[in-house]
Image: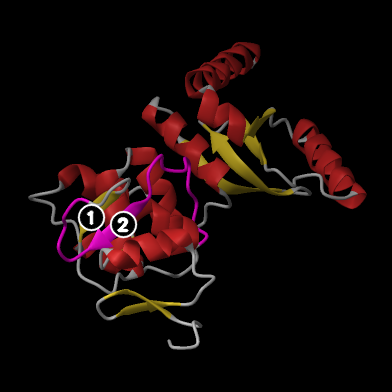
Amino acid sequence: MSAGTVQRVARGVYALPDADPLLLHAGRHHAVPGCVTAALAAGLWVVRRPEKPHLAARHGRSITGCVVHRSSIPLTHLDMVCQSLRCLPPLEGLAIAESAVKTGLVQLPELREKFPAAREKALRALVARIQPQSGSIIETMARYLLEEAGLTVELQVKIPGMGHLDLLVDGLLGIETDGYAHHSSREAYREDRRRWNVTVVRGVPTLRVTFEMLLGEPNEFVRMVQQALATYRTAQ
C-alpha cells in the first residue's frame, strides 16, 4: 500500500490502481455486482443492458446510482439468476436463467427448488419454461413471444439433409435466427443458402428473424408469424 500499488477502498476492501470503477463504487459500499449486471459479467444472455448497475449487498441499503439487491455475499451464480428472475420482466429473466442452465453455471433442479409452488407460482412457471437446448438468445426470445401468443414451438427440429431447424411453429412454419456474425465467412454464407434451399425442397416455409426485430418490434414479429401460418394453412 505504501508504494501505491494497492489502495484501501473501504474497511477490509482493497483494490489495484486499474480496478473497474463500478467495482470500486460497489466496494466502497461493501457490495458486489448482482442480478443483470452480474449476468453481463458472466457472459449470459442479457436482452437489455440496465439503465443503472445492479448490486448485491448484505445490508440492502440504497447506493447512489445503483439498484441494490439484499443478498448474502459472496454472490453465487444461483443467487444471481434468482435475482434476475425476481427483478426483471419475464422474458429478460428467462433469457438469463436459460443461458445459465445451458452453460452449466446453474443446475435446473436446484433452480426449481428456489421457487416454492405455494408462494411463487408465476416464477416457478417461468422456470418450467427453461429449455437448455436453446441455441441462442434470439431463439429464446422468439420462442417466448410465440408461446405467449398461444402458438406451439419446437426447438432444434431435425430436417433431413439440412441439420436442425432453430424453431418449428405449430408443426408447419420454420424460424431461423440471424445473429451478428451469422455470415462471418463465405463458407458460412454458402451453408446458409444450402440450408435455406433444403427447407424449401422439404416443404418447410421458413422465416428469418434478427435480435433487433424481436427487441424493437415484438408484436410485428408475432403478427408476421401468424400471417404466414394462415397463408400456408390456406394453401394446404
**Residue 133: percent from left, percent from top:** 52, 56
Query: Depth check: 62 or 208 in front?
Result: 62
Res 190 → quadrant: top right
Residue under the image location 32 percent in, 71 percent down: 76
Q: What residue type is labelled 2?
A: Leu
In the displayed structure image, the side of residue 116 where residue 75 appears, left or right: right
Residue under the image location 47 percent in, 19 percent down: 219
The residue beneath circle 2 is 55
Q: Which numbered marker is on residue 69?
A: 1
**Residue 172 shows in the view:** yes
In the displayed structure image, the side of residue 121 where residue 76 appears, left or right: right
**Residue 225: percent from left, percent from top:** 56, 22
Q: How crowded is mark 2: few (under 14 residues within 10 Å), some or many (20 or more)?
A: many
Q: What element carries label 1?
A: strand
The main secondary structure of the magenta stretch is loop
**Residue 132 shows in the view:** no
Pick out the residue farthest to the bottom. Answer: 2
Q: Mark 2 and mark 1: span between their CA atoms?
A: 6 Å
Q: Which numbered marker is on residue 5?
A: none
Residue 44 among those drawn in magenta: yes
Residues at marks 2 and 1 touching, judged by CB atoms closer than 8 Å: yes
Q: Residues within 10 Å of mark 1 (few under 14, many from 20)?
A: many
Res 115 → quadrant: bottom left
**What is the quadrant of the C terminus in the image?**
top right
Pick out the residue farthest to the front. Answer: 2
**Residue 203: percent from left, percent from top:** 72, 30
Residue under the image location 48 percent in, 42 percent down: 47
- Residue 77 in the image: above or below residue 92: below
- Where does the magenta region start and end? 43-62
Q: What element carries label 2?
A: strand
**What is the quadrant of the N terminus in the image?**
bottom left
